Amino acid sequence: MKSTNMKGFGLLVSTLLIMASVGANAGESHMAEALKHAEAAAKADNGKAIAEHADKAKTHATAADEHLDAGVTSLNDAIDHAKMKHVDLAKKSAEEAVTHLKAAQ
């Protein structure tokens, strides 16, 4: 398979995975969920509830961080493609960045 075909396939797979992960978390953002659970942990009166809420907060905060990292990677890809005058690929990378950054909010 040619290099450009592999890149196109990789881009397609990445986009589908992003859409699936965003769809799974369409209710509230990861940061909102992390904050909600961290606040609940801070208000809880027993160790079990604190641990459960803190664990959920950590999971969402980690997911937000992963989306931020992926967003930065996509933005770097957009910059690189734009510099090479690959406008379509640059736009797709920028769109991926938007998806990740929204998911991280």
Image (cartoon, grey):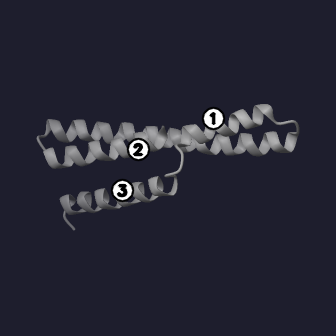
How crowded pointer 3 is (Cα within 10 Å; few <14, some 14-19, many 20+) is rated as few
Residue situated in front as seen by the camera: 74 or 20? 20
Identify the residue under disc 1.
35
Where is residue 12, by image quadrant?
bottom left
Where is residue 87, by image quadrant?
top left
Which amino acid type is marked by label 3?
Ser
Could you tell which of marks 2 and 1 lies nearer the N-terminus?
A: 1
Question: At numbered mark 3, what does the secondary structure look like: helix, strand or loop?
Answer: helix
Q: How far apart are marks 2 and 1 (CA)?
A: 19 Å
Q: Which of marks 3 and 2 is in front?
A: 2
How crowded pointer 2 is (Cα within 10 Å; few <14, some 14-19, many 20+) is rated as many
Q: Where is residue 71 in the image (x, y as percent from the top left)?
A: 38, 40
On screen, residue 83 versus residue 42, left or right, reads left
Identify the residue under disc 3.
14
How crowded pointer 1 is (Cα within 10 Å; few <14, some 14-19, many 20+) is rated as some
Question: At numbered mark 2, what does the secondary structure look like: helix, strand or loop?
Answer: helix
Q: Where is residue 37 in the image (x, y as percent from the top left)?
A: 69, 40
Identify the residue under disc 2.
100
Q: Distance between the residues labelled 3 and 2?
A: 11 Å
On screen, residue 35 versus residue 78, left or right, reads right
Residue farthest front in this picture: 27
Give the residue drawn at x 57%, y 38%: 32
Q: Nearer the viewer, mark 1 or mark 3?
A: 1
Could you tell which of marks 1 and 3 lies nearer the N-terminus?
A: 3
Q: Position of residue 81 (x, y in %)?
A: 19, 42
